[in-house]
């Protein structure tokens, strides 16, 4: 490659990356959003899942986490971690958070988000230059950056940073398709597929579907369609997915064991709203964020009118753009895009593929040179027609029309300028200015709208630092648990703040954990997948909670049990409707009294169970706020304080609540009796637990951890005991955890590696015999 060409190539990638980073950071700065202003980014799953999981990864990489890659001892009283890793943290970029201080984890996640956007721009630029030359090198940078700065990236990907790996995957998988079409790089192709699927299987699946459609068009356009090419593509994909199977299979089975979300039927968005989202500065949670810089639809539309482009090329690329757009609105193809399940959240998560296809269509036209006036007029007519169709939509803003119109004029003007000297520089400034202006404005608008429309949470600050330090000082694991307590910061406070509590939020929240916590009086949001900390003396005793955050400080609890206890011979508890009776069944003793005429005996602690109530409950001068309403929310069992006055009845927010009167003396007696039969020593490992039981112990050894699938114990198969892990007591207890599907995934990965080795051997033999490896 000539030196000048290499220089332009490197310049293209760097320019695309810089444009993307500048647009994202510039838009956040305009909106005065973290880290450029007082408004925070902590909304929805970004605060509830992604930041806490990255904080836990930081702890893992620094050797400070309780648990390991297979088992997480901190959230949900002990849960499988490999599915969470494969869903949220397996990106090659995720470990970069360890380069930041722990207290700057939000800065780290933001930096990784911007970096992923920049890499997506560079990857698309690389693909465009690989597909064919254009007259001016910077056009590849602009279109690559336009892809990375599409509306899906700016409105959806920015607070779901794991999805941005799919944004990177699409151009990389299209590149693999080119290698397959040419019969080149048979070893590198499966490895690229493996990295994409390992990084984020969900969006990689969508990117793979999109890349397959692009490959079919490329085969048809270039007259290189061969069935063996499709077979080679299928083999390349299968080998790559197989290499990622050690993580993919546990993720799949983790979803199978998860508490079920609400099943929804897909309802397509209004056509006018879909067209409106093609414009900058629009926002809606339930419509496809299809915006891409006006230069892209203008050039893609111009391709349809170019006389210097083959008719088959024009109509195949135009047809592909239309087919992808329509497929997002039709129920059956919607399910195909989303792995045959309508998402609980945004139903248009594949929109980045449409943006990528539009960019490829635009570049295909530029491969024949800049458009002439006739084709440019046709492209402008397409853009104007789409905009006119969006006019009835309530999603349109004045800024959307202004920026779209200004962008159309600027890009069209740039394409009409002479192509030499200072005019070339002016054209570049007009086009890049349109890109940066539209993308930054869309970023700023989305920042503001997210904060107004979505749940938001307090960003990391001095109070969180103080709370985390207090929890760390009180930590005594595994002798006892320290609960991050209430009020909560996010859905995964034990991962973010420290300790080992019940709170946990994931797509893989085990059904047995949700059901057990609910039976004992626990609360939730997100339809049972976002579990809340349960502040209750009985459950604290049962689960060995020795310290918890409450009312701005860490409080110690002394009626607690070790992680392993031995229960008398007999059947396991069978839960009923009352959490008070269920707690007593698991404890093995009566500790609650029933209220008399709605009032508890003096000296007992009054607890209210009203899972569907919303409002304030009061007992004297003590009040508690409830937020319930199944199936989305469930209020937790909550204390109304000590009964100090005879006959004082609580004021409840509505009918249907149940009161329980906890006798702390009875609880201490029950705990003392169980402690006499508890393990004499307990040792936890990153993948299991070991305990020394009292000599001659009989009955059932119960571990204060949920009986999730994957536990294996020496000497006997584990059994559930009121939803907890248990085994018959005989000798010491030794249990290890292996996520379901890990062995099958390792076997599939090994088979794929052997298959890749076979491809390598066949390729070497073909070279030695002088035959083409194709």
Image: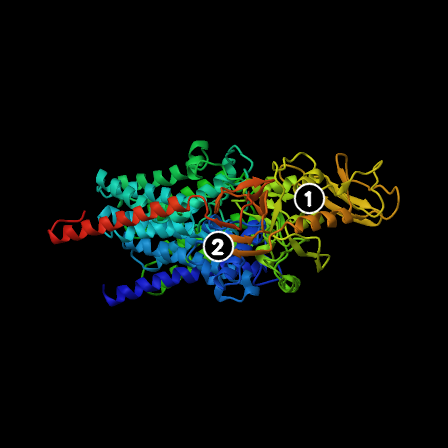
Answer few, some or many: residues within 10 Å of disc 2's Cα (few below 14, many 20 plus, some between 14 and 19). many
Q: Is residue 22 above or below residue 317?
A: below
User: In what element is the residue under mark 1?
Assistant: loop
Q: Dot 2 lies on which element?
A: helix
Q: CA distance from mark 2 to mark 1?
A: 43 Å
In this rendering, position of residue 81 left or right of residue 227: right
Instruction: Report whether residue 79 is seen.
Output: yes
Residue at the outermost front position: 696
User: Residue at the spot x=31%, y=39% of the render?
Assistant: 316
Image spot of residue 734 (x, y percent): 50, 50
Label pair 2/1, CB-CB below 8 angstroms: no
Q: Mark 1: few, some, or many residues within 10 Å (few <14, many ≥20)? A: many
Question: What is the image's colouring?
Answer: rainbow
Would you name the residue on which mark 2 appears? 439
Q: Is residue 185 above or below residue 234?
A: below
Q: Nearer the viewer, residue 729 or 406?
A: 729
> Upstream in the sequence, badge 2 or badge 1?
2
Q: Nearer the viewer, mark 2 or mark 1?
A: 1
Q: Which mark is residue 698?
A: none
Q: Position of residue 43 (x, y in %)?
A: 59, 52
Residue 484 sits in quarter: bottom right
Q: Which sits in the foreground, 235 or 126?
A: 235
Is residue 28 positioned above or below 206 on the image?
A: below
Q: Nearer the viewer, residue 277 or 608?
A: 608
What residue is disc 1 on?
636
**Left or right of 637, for residue 143:** left
Q: Position of residue 415 (x, y in %)?
A: 36, 54
Question: Residue at horizontal 23%, vertical 38%?
Answer: 227
Residue at 30% across, 55% down = 129
Res 361 seen here: no
Q: Quadrant of residue 528?
A: top right
Residue 386: x, y in percent? 45, 41
């Amino acid at each position: 490659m000539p030196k000048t060409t290499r220089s332009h190539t490197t310049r293209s990638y760097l320019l695309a990356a810089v444009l993307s980073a500048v647009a994202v950071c510039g838009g956040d700065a305009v909106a005065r959003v973290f880290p450029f202003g007082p408004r925070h980014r902590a909304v929805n799953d970004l605060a509830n899942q992604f930041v806490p999981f990255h904080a836990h990864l930081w702890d893992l990489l620094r050797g400070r986490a309780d648990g390991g890659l297979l088992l997480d001892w901190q959230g949900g009283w002990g849960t499988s971690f490999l599915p969470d890793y494969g869903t949220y943290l397996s990106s090659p970029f995720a470990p970069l958070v360890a380069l930041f201080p722990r207290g700057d984890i939000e800065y780290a996640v933001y930096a990784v988000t911007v970096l992923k956007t920049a890499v997506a721009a560079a990857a698309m630029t690389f693909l465009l230059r690989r597909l064919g030359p254009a007259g001016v090198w910077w056009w590849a940078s602009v279109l690559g950056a336009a892809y990375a700065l599409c509306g899906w990236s700016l409105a959806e990907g920015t607070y779901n940073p794991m999805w941005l790996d799919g944004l990177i995957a699409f151009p990389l998988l299209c590149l693999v398709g080119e290698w397959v079409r040419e019969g080149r790089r048979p070893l590198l192709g499966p490895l690229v597929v493996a990295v994409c699927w390992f990084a984020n299987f969900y969006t990689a699946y969508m990117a793979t579907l999109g890349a397959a459609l692009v490959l079919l068009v490329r085969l048809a356009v270039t007259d290189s369609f061969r069935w063996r090419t499709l077979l080679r593509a299928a083999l390349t994909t299968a080998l790559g997915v197989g290499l990622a199977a050690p993580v993919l299979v546990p993720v799949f089975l983790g979803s199978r064991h998860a508490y079920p979300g609400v099943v929804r039927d897909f309802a397509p968005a209004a056509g006018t709203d879909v067209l409106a989202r093609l414009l900058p500065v629009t926002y809606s949670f339930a419509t496809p964020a299809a915006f891409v810089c006006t230069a892209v639809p203008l050039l893609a539309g111009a391709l349809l009118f170019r006389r210097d482009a083959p008719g088959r090329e024009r109509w195949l690329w135009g047809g592909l753009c239309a087919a992808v757009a329509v497929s997002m609105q039709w129920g059956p193809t919607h399910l195909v895009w989303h792995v045959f399940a309508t998402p609980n959240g945004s139903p248009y998560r594949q929109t980045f593929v449409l943006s990528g296809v539009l960019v490829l269509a635009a570049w295909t036209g530029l491969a024949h040179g800049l458009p002439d006036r006739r084709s440019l007029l046709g492209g402008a007519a397409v853009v104007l027609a789409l905009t006119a169709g969006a006019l009835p939509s309530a999603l349109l803003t004045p800024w959307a029309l202004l920026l779209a119109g200004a962008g159309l004029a600027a890009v069209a003007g740039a394409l009409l300028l002479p192509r030499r000297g200072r005019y070339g520089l002016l054209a570049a400034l007009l086009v890049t200015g349109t890109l940066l202006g539209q993308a930054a404005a869309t970023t700023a608008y989305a920042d503001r709208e997210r904060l107004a429309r979505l749940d938001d949470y307090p960003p990391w600050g001095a109070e969180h630092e103080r709370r985390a330090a207090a929890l760390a000082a009180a930590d005594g694991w595994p002798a006892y648990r320290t609960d991050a307590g209430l009020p909560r910061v996010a859905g995964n406070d034990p991962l973010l703040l420290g300790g080992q509590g019940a709170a946990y939020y994931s797509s893989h929240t085990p059904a047995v954990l949700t059901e057990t916590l609910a039976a004992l009086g626990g609360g939730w949001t997100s339809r049972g997948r976002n579990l809340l900390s349960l502040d209750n003396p009985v459950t604290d005793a049962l689960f060995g909670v020795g310290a918890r955050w409450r009312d701005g400080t860490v409080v110690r609890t002394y009626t607690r049990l070790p992680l392993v206890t031995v229960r008398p011979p007999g059947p396991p508890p069978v839960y009923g409707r009352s959490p008070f009776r269920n707690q007593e069944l698991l404890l093995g003793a009566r500790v609650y009294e029933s209220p008399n005429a709605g009032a508890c005996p003096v000296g007992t602690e009054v607890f209210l169970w009203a899972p569907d109530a919303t409002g304030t409950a009061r007992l004297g001068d003590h009040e508690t706020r409830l937020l319930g309403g199944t199936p989305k929310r469930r209020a937790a069992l909550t204390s109304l304080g000590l009964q100090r006055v005879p006959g004082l009845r609580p004021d409840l927010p509505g009918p249907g609540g149940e009161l329980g009167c906890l006798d702390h003396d009875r609880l201490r007696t029950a705990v003392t009796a169980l402690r006499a039969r508890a393990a004499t020593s307990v040792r936890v490992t990153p993948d299991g637990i070991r305990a020394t039981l009292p000599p001659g112990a009989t009955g059932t050894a119960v571990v204060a951890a949920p009986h999730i699938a994957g536990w294996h114990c020496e000497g006997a198969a584990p059994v559930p005991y009121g939803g907890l892990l248990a085994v018959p007591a005989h000798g010491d207890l030794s249990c290890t955890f292996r996520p379901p599907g890990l062995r099958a995934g390792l076997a599939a990965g090994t088979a794929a590696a052997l298959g890749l080795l076979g491809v390598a051997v066949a390729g070497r033999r073909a070279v030695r015999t002088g035959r083409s490896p194709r």
